[in-house]
């Protein structure tokens, strides 16, 4: 972050605008809207600037700029097209430690203006740190289009009822729940419809019903976070991630995804603490119950999909037993992410008519699978948690009938910036994995579809876009 975002109160404070053209007019108008006293100095002024003279807070001085104009000023904007004058204003303001902005001249700015979306008391500021103002403006246009125009009225309503709601709920969690259901429910709909009186009536009714003391009930969200790329989250996952006040996550959840949970949420890591020690599942279950029973909204955030080798089923069983309300949100399983991001389809009419997801790590710590079924031709196998058993897996598949030339792909860190794909076949994959230092998390793909690897990359745009952003996927091919 090159600039620190800050909203500052300039009401009745003295600001200076140097320049008398259209840009000076726009900047001066913005300062006046925020309630400041503005002095505009320029030997020549345009009609719009002249019109500002009607505003009592605006003083126009038709003179050349001089240093003394900076006396008592708390902020300076230079909007002239004379480079030497802009530099002079910048250096004079700097000498006096007055924040200064020379329009369209990032080198001569100690502060910059963000692009702004205003919705009543709500202000959203977008800033590209002076590097790409056009991109900032485009983003602003997008935000403008998705935030209902009446959003500000909602903030006004919140302002009006803030004290009343505070005294109705002593518990901060309940208070937050109340406001969230106002902002996301029927009251908000009425406001957006322009039915303000009805909205207020509904809010009052809701306040009466909701503030009756009731038993605190928590809730658990079992949410699939996908394989790693945050853009693969579902809207629902994101919404619940931003609601939960306790987050229980494991090692497959990337920091970028964790960053999207609420900042003030209590975050508990239950992944591997050392090379061998995971937090036992029963302890994770206890944590879920403990926090939910205290009335919290608990997010159990899991890599991939919660119900695919994620033990989400076991957690849900415990919640059912204790009658704790819960929701399960699917996530993109790593096999789907690895498949699309590496350009290896899971099925293809020419090569594979079915796909099997199987775990290489059984409950009894063995890798004792139904090899006969897995070794059928014309299908794709995706083996989760199989890296440690790679030698056994490839030997058994060959022993049960698959040719040892059957292609195998290992996809490590699928969908992440550091995704790595390693290609081999059943006879050499163990060696190839070692040579290429493949480590967990990785999936094993087995089947003829792997022959398509490399041919579908042109259409795999999302991966290419990440690559273009510098997160170069390290993809090695090894025969
Ligand atoms: N619920 C998860 C799977 C959890 S089991 C899902 O639906 O994807 C853990 C195994 O998943 C890992 O050992 C690895 O085989 C696989 N895995 C999870 N995320 C991965 C990723 N980003 N890249 C490759 N493999 C991944």
Image: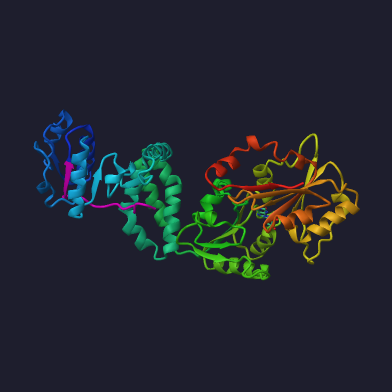
| Boundaries of the magenta span | 1-17
Q: Is residue 128 above or below residue 302?
A: above
Q: How many marks?
A: 0
Which residue in the rendered view is the most extreme toward the top? 47
Q: Quadrant of residue 464?
A: top right
Q: Is residue 262 above or below residue 89?
A: below
Residue visible at 79% across and 67% down? Answer: 364
Q: Is residue 475 above or below residue 209?
A: above
Q: Position of residue 414 (x, y in %)?
A: 64, 50
**203, 174: nearer the viewer:** 174
Residue visible at 21% across and 43% down? Answer: 87
Question: Image check: 86 left or right of 361?
Answer: left
Q: Is residue 472 above or below residue 168?
A: above
Question: Image check: 23 left or right of 247?
Answer: left
Q: Position of residue 383 (x, y in %)?
A: 76, 53
**16, 407: nearer the viewer:** 407
Residue visible at 13% across and 49% down? Answer: 70
Q: How is the image coloured?
A: rainbow
Residue 11 visible in image: no
**Main SS type for the magenta part?**
loop
Q: Is residue 15 magenta?
A: yes
Q: Position of residue 96 (x, y in %)?
A: 17, 54
Residue 262 visible in image: yes
The image quadrant in which ligand 1 is located: bottom right
Q: Is residue 445 magenta?
A: no
Q: Position of residue 48 (x, y in %)?
A: 17, 30
**203, 5: nearer the viewer:** 5
């Amino acid at each position: 972050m090159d600039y620190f975002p800050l909203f500052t109160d300039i009401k009745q404070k003295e600001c200076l605008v140097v320049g008398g053209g259209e840009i000076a007019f726009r900047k001066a108008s913005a300062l006046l809207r925020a309630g400041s006293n503005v002095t505009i100095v320029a030997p020549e002024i345009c009609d719009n600037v002249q019109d500002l003279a009607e505003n009592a807070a605006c003083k126009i001085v038709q003179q050349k700029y001089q240093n003394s104009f900076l006396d008592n000023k708390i902020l300076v904007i230079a909007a002239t097209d004379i480079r030497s004058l802009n530099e002079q204003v910048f250096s004079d303001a700097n000498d006096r430690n007055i924040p200064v902005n020379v329009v369209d001249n990032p080198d001569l700015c100690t502060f910059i203006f963000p692009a702004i979306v205003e919705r009543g008391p709500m202000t959203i500021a977008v800033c590209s740190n002076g590097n790409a103002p056009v991109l900032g403006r485009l983003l602003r246009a997008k935000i403008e289009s998705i935030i209902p125009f009446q959003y500000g009225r909602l903030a006004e309503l919140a302002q009006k009822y803030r004290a009343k709601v505070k005294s109705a709920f002593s518990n901060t969690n309940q208070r937050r729940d109340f406001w969230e259901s106002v902002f996301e429910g029927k009251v908000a709909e009425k406001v957006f419809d322009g039915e303000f009186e009805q909205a207020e009536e509904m809010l009052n009714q809701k306040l009466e019903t909701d503030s009756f003391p009731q038993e605190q009930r928590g809730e658990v969200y079992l949410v699939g976070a996908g394989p790693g790329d945050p853009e693969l989250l579902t809207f629902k996952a994101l919404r619940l991630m931003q609601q939960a006040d306790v987050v229980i996550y494991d090692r497959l959840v990337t920091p970028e995804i964790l960053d999207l949970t609420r900042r003030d949420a209590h975050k508990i890591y239950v992944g591997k603490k050392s090379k061998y020690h995971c937090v036992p599942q029963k302890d994770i279950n206890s944590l879920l119950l403990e926090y939910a029973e205290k009335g919290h909204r608990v997010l159990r955030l899991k890599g991939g999909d919660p119900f695919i080798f994620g033990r989400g089923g076991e957690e849900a069983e415990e919640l059912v037993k204790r009658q704790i309300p819960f929701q399960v949100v699917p996530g993109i399983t790593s096999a789907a992410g690895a498949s699309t991001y590496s350009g290896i389809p899971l099925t293809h009419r020419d090569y594979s008519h079915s796909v099997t997801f199987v775990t290489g790590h059984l409950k009894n710590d063995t890798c004792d699978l139904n090899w006969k079924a897995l070794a059928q031709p014309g299908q794709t196998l995706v083996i989760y948690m199989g890296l440690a058993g790679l030698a056994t897996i490839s030997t058994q598949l060959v022993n049960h009938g698959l040719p040892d030339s059957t292609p195998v792909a290992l996809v490590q860190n699928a969908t992440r910036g550091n995704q790595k794909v390693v290609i081999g076949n059943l006879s050499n994959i163990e060696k190839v994995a070692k040579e290429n230092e493949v480590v967990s998390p990785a999936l094993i793909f087995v089947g003829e579809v792997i022959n398509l690897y490399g041919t579908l990359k042109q259409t795999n745009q999302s991966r290419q876009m990440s690559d273009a952003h510098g997160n170069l996927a390290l993809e090695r091919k090894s025969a």
